[in-house]
């Protein structure tokens, strides 16, 4: 079963391929996605990585949480479902 991880503190210059390679030390990476701003297309500094098994996801959390990636300490934990938030009015 694929397990999705939240990754915070990703360097703004990092690519999805670099994120995938960084997490591959913990196991098989199914996908790696960096979230970008809709208007500027620049990284927001966080993303999601899907590991192929729960065990590999737990290993990634243990191995990579608070580790340095490109000069920044990253946060790694199991992703939670997106919460419904009220619409923003401008």
Image: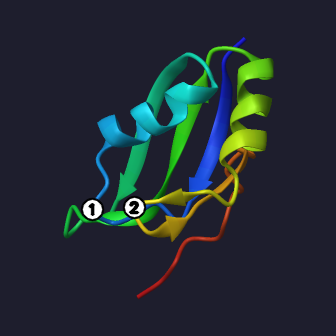
Pinpoint residue 84: horizontal percent, then vertical percent: 69, 58
Position of 36 with respect to 75 (left or right) is left
Q: Local crowd at mark 2 within 10 Å, few (<14), some, or many (≥20)?
A: few
**Distance CA(mark 2)–CA(mark 1):** 8 Å
Position of 42 with respect to 5 (left or right) is left
Query: What residue sits 72% from the left and 15% below the top?
Result: 53
Q: Compared to 85, does 1 lie above or below?
A: above
**Reading the chain from its start, which is encountered first: label 2 or label 1?**
1
Query: What residue sits 44% from the left and 65% below the top?
Result: 45
> Quick check: marks 2 and 1 in contact, CB under 8 Å?
yes
Q: Local crowd at mark 1 within 10 Å, few (<14), some, or many (≥20)?
A: few
Secondary structure of the residue carrying tag 1 is loop
Pinpoint residue 82: horizontal percent, then vertical percent: 67, 50
Q: Which quadrant of the figure contains the N terminus? A: top right
Q: Compared to 52, does 36 lie above or below?
A: below
Secondary structure of the residue carrying tag 2 is loop
Q: Which mark is residue 13?
A: 1
Q: Which mark is residue 77?
A: none
Pinpoint residue 68: horizontal percent, then vertical percent: 54, 60
Q: Nearer the viewer, residue 88 or 61?
A: 61
> Residue 70: which quarter of the image?
bottom left
Query: What residue sits 29% from the left and 47% below the top?
Result: 15
Find disc 2 in the rendering and name its residue.
70
Q: Which quadrant of the figure contains the C terminus? A: bottom left
Residue positioned most to the top: 1
Q: Nearer the viewer, residue 11 or 3?
A: 11
């Amino acid at each position: 079963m694929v397990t999705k991880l939240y990754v915070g503190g990703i360097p703004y210059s990092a690519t999805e391929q670099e994120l995938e390679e960084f997490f591959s030390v913990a196991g098989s990476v199914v996908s790696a996605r960096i979230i970008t701003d809709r208007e500027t297309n620049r990284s927001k500094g966080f993303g999601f990585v899907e590991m192929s098994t729960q065990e590999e996801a737990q290993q990634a959390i243990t191995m990579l949480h608070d580790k340095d990636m490109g000069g920044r300490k990253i946060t790694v934990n199991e992703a939670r479902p997106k919460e419904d938030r009220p619409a923003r009015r401008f």
